[in-house]
Image (tube, rainbow, N blue to C red):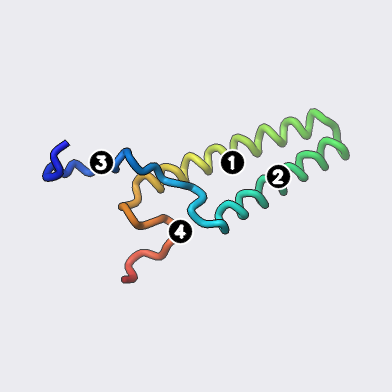
Amino acid sequence: MDHRLRVGLHPLSEPRNPFKREQDAFRLLVIVGAAALLVIAVAVLVNTTAGALLALILALVGGSMALKWLRLQLEAPDGQDDDEPRGRG
């Protein structure tokens, strides 16, 4: 593609990394761990069917949140993440 042609496409050579910061990776680890503990507790205290249903619900909610976050990341201009404040510079 000609470098003068600007169509608003993101370069394909550099995919976005969801774990650019260690803080983001640790936050995801804590969230997944808490969800796993909750599912195990419900499965032990109530029954395994309730634990399986809770695991399915949490997986669907987590997946939809991940897709929403990914959509925002793909729409963000280069060099500007969704977590960073906008308008300061």
Q: Residue 54's x, y, as percent?
A: 72, 36
| Mark-to-mark CA distance, 3 and 2 | 36 Å
Tell me the residue at 82%/35% (across/down). 43
Kind of residue at badge 3: Leu
Q: Is residue 80 left or right of residue 7?
A: right
- In the image, is residue 89 above or below residue 46? below
Q: Earlier in the sequence, mark 2 or mark 4?
A: 2
Q: Earlier in the sequence, mark 4 or mark 3?
A: 3
Q: Residues within 10 Å of mark 1 (few under 14, many from 20)?
A: some
Residue that badge 1 annotates: 62
- In this view of the protein, which residue sits in the foreground, 73 or 62? 73
Residue that badge 4 annotates: 83
Q: Secondary structure at mark 3?
A: loop
| Mark-to-mark CA distance, 2 and 4 | 23 Å
| Mark-to-mark CA distance, 1 and 3 | 28 Å
Tell me the residue at 16%/44% (across/down). 6
Which mark's residue is nearer the viewer, 4 or 3?
3
Q: Residue 34's x, y, as percent?
A: 72, 48
Q: Residue 71's x, y, as percent?
A: 41, 42
Q: Secondary structure at mark 1?
A: helix
Kind of residue at badge 1: Gly
Q: Is residue 9 left or right of residue 40?
A: left
Residue that badge 3 annotates: 9
- In the image, is residue 86 above or below residue 70? below
Q: Earlier in the sequence, mark 3 or mark 2?
A: 3
Kind of residue at badge 4: Asp
Q: Earlier in the sequence, mark 1 or mark 4?
A: 1
Residue that badge 2 annotates: 35
